[in-house]
Image: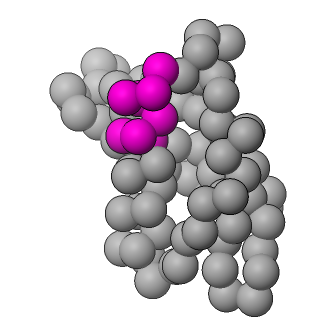
Amino acid sequence: MAQKPGFRIFEIGETRIRAGWNGRAASVAFARDDDVLVIDLDSAATWENGEDIEMNELTRLLELIESECAARGIEAEFE
């Protein structure tokens, strides 16, 4: 089944968030500090296919993570 343009990917696992759009995703590490997810920015360097994440894509990816966490009532911090 073809994905709609702008299709967003967001999944929270035990230690990683998988996020992206249009079938392109990155797996980003996080740690829990009380009720806050502390996102490891260093782990957001490549897409799952091994391609580097460009700066404009990284900005969009982090905005996606922040907005999806907020929509779920989860506080996210980036380090």
Q: Quadrant of the C terminus?
A: bottom right
Q: Position of residue 72 (x, y in %)?
A: 44, 76
Q: Main secondary structure of the magenta part?
A: helix
**Closer-to-camera residue (78/71):** 78
Residue at image coords 38%, 52% = 63
Residue at image coords 77%, 80% = 33
Q: Quadrant of the N terminus?
A: top left
Query: Visible in this render: residue 49?
Result: no
Residue at image coords 66%, 46% = 41
Q: Position of residue 27 (x, y in %)?
A: 66, 38
Asked if residue 21 lies left or right of residue 74, the reply is left
Magenta-colored span: 54-61
Extreme-left residue of the structure: 5
Query: Visible in this render: residue 21?
Result: yes
Location of residue 38 by image quarter: bottom right
Position of residue 69 relative to residue 34, above or below, is: above
Position of residue 15 relative to residue 25, above or below, is: below
Q: Is residue 59 magenta?
A: yes
Asked if residue 34 lies left or right of residue 39, the reply is right
Q: Position of residue 2 (x, y in %)?
A: 29, 19
Residue at image coords 41%, 40% = 59
Location of residue 37 by image quarter: bottom right
Q: Position of residue 51 (x, y in %)?
A: 60, 11
Position of residue 51 relative to residue 73, above or below, is: above
Q: Is residue 5 magenta?
A: no
